[in-house]
Amino acid sequence: MKIKYQTLSITALLLLTSLAGGAFGQRSRSVGDPSDAKKPAPSATTTAPAPQSMKVKYEGGIFGYNKKQTGTLNFDDESSRLVFRDKAQKEYISIPYKAIAAAYADTQSRRPTAATVISNVPSIFALPARFIRKKYRYLTMQFSDPDTQVHGVTSFKVDNKEVLASFLEAVARKAELTPRGEAYVRLDKPKDKDKDK
C-alpha cells in the first residue's frame, strides 16, 4: 500500500513539474525597436562563381544518346553551347545555348541500390535498410533545338548543391533565360504586329 502511494505521489510530482515547465516556456516576446524597421534587410545569399566545367553523370534524354555515363559538363562560350565530355574527355553531346528552353535544379529522394539489396535479404538489417534514403541532385534542362526541331528533357546528376546552384545560374545567364519560381525559362519574344501586316 505504501509503494502504491509513493508511485502515485511521484507520478503527480512529475506531472506538476512538466506543467510548470510548460508555463515557463510560454514567455511573452519582446517587441523590436521601431528603428530596426528602417534598417535594410540582409541581402540575399549570392552563389559562388560557376566553374568552367563540373563533374556530372549524364542520365539520358537526348535522342540517340541513351548510355548513362560519368563525365564533365563544360561551357563552350566560343560556340555558344554546353558540352558533355565522357571520362576520356571525348565530346559526347552538346546543347546550343539557344536550344535551352528551361533549366532547373531538381532533388529526388531515393533508396540507394545497396539499401535496396539489403532490404530484400532476410536478416535483422532488412527493416532498417528500408528507411535509408539519399538525396540526389540534378541539373535538368528542357531543350528545343530550332535547327532540328527536336524537343526533349535531359538531366545530369550532380554531387555538390552549391556548385549546382552556381552552374544553373551561369547556364541561365548564357542562355538568356528568365527566372520563374525556382526555375529559369525562355520567354517568347512578342511578335511585331507591323511585320504581320
Image (tube, rainbow, N blue to C red):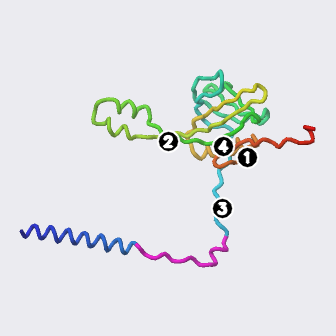
**Numbered range of the magenta stretch:** 26-39
Q: Are marks 2 and 1 in contact (CB under 8 Å)?
A: no
Disc 3/disc 4 C-alpha distance (Å): 20 Å
Quadrant of the snapshot with the C terminus: top right
Mark 2 highlights which residue? 135
Is 27 inside the magenta-drawn segment?
yes
Q: Is residue 19 magenta?
A: no
As helix, strand or loop, the secondary structure at mark 4 comes to helix
Residue 183, relative to residue 72: is it above or below?
below
| Distance of label 2 from label 1 (alpha carbons) | 27 Å
Q: Position of residue 25 (x, y in %)?
A: 39, 72
Residue at 22% x, 72% y: name it. 13
Q: Amino acid at mark 2?
A: Lys
Label 3's element? loop
Name the residue type under label 3. Ser
Disc 1/disc 3 C-alpha distance (Å):
21 Å
| Disc on the earlier residue, 1 or 3 | 3
What mark, if any, has residue 168 been given in the picture?
4
**Residues at circles 3 and 4 in contact by the CB criterion of under 8 Å:** no
For disc 3, the neighbor class at 10 Å (few under 14, some 14 to 19, many from 20) is: few
| In the image, residue 26 above or below residue 188 | below
First along the sequence among labels 2 and 1: 2
The location of residue 83, given as percent across then percent down, is: 69, 31
Residue in the image at 6% along x and 68% along y? 1
Task: Say which residue appears at 24% left-offset and 69% top-offset.
Answer: 14
Query: Mark on residue 43?
Result: 3
SS of the residue under disc 2: strand
